[in-house]
Amino acid sequence: MGKELNKEFYDSVFEYGGSEEMYFKDYKETSWFPVWSKIIDIISDGNFKNVLDIGCGPGQFANQLIDTLPEIKYTGLDFSYIAIDQAIKRVPTFNFIVADALKFDFSSLEYDVVVSTEFLEHVIQDKSILKSLKSGVLILATLPNMDSEGHVRFLSKDVDTAKSEILNHYGDICEILEISYHHYENTEDNGDFLIKMVLK
Ligand SMILES: C[S@@+](CC[C@H](N)C(=O)[O-])C[C@H]1O[C@@H](n2cnc3c(N)ncnc32)[C@H](O)[C@@H]1O
């Protein structure tokens, strides 16, 4: 198990591109491309118009989103200014904010759907961030099933056990609509859970 890390740590990760320079890659080359495609399908099918992305990182998801849905509005928030710098370079027309999600007043923003990929497991008080969003909003979040130095919790490798862990953790504040597992290519048992949930 890792620990909650500060923005300077993430700045340095985005400066060198992370393990195997994954943050420098085109979105199509990342392990997250299939699960991000699923998120974008849900946004498109639900006719959502205005995405809020919490812990958006260096803008690879944003890049895939604008390539797929060029009319969509989007705000990405992250406390790493290096990540946001890279995100602005990838998608200059989207709105990006450098801020700590634990201190940010989300009521100042307009959004009709929330995305948060590989972020909630980095924050001890992740549920207090979700609770500060508007009630009734659809949240599309991904959580990986492996440990890392910045993960304050991680999910079991057993898919059914992991789904129960997700229900136990978020079920009190969100109605869980669906949890799907997306296995990464070329790995034995690593993957992401995509959680579709509505804030109560
Ligand atoms: C593993 S990265 C995921 C980035 C991106 N969402 C993705 O899927 O590639 C986690 C991100 O959360 C950001 N982060 C961690 N704690 C944060 C906080 N309290 N407020 C804002 N951003 C935070 C980090 O800077 C980093 O960009």
Image (cartoon, rainbow, N blue to C red):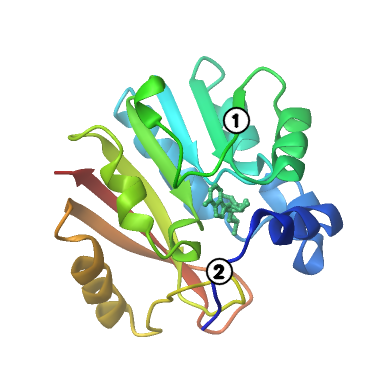
Q: Position of 131 compared to 151: left or right?
A: left
Classify mark 1: residues with Cα within 10 Å, few (<14), some (14-19) or many (20+): some
- Between 163 and 67, the one nearer to me in the picture: 163
Callout 1: SS: strand
Find residue 134 and report its horizontal and vertical position in percent: 25, 32
Q: Against 95, is 116 above or below? A: below
> Disc 2 marks which residue?
184
Quadrant assignment, res 165: bottom left
In this rendering, the label closer to the viewer, 1 or 2: 1
> Disc 1 marks which residue?
97
Classify mark 2: residues with Cα within 10 Å, few (<14), some (14-19) or many (20+): some
Q: Residue at x 76, y 63 (%)?
A: 18
Q: Residue at x 57, y 38 (%)?
A: 99
Q: Residue at x 67, y 56 (%)?
A: 30
Q: Residue at x 28, y 49 (%)?
A: 196
- Between 197 and 125, the one nearer to me in the picture: 125
Ligand 1 within 8 angstroms of badge 1 C-beta: no
Find residue 54 and report its horizontal and vertical position in percent: 48, 42
Q: Position of 51 compared to 10: left or right?
A: left
Q: Position of 100 compared to 130: left or right?
A: right
Amino acid type, callout 1: Ile
Callout 2: SS: loop
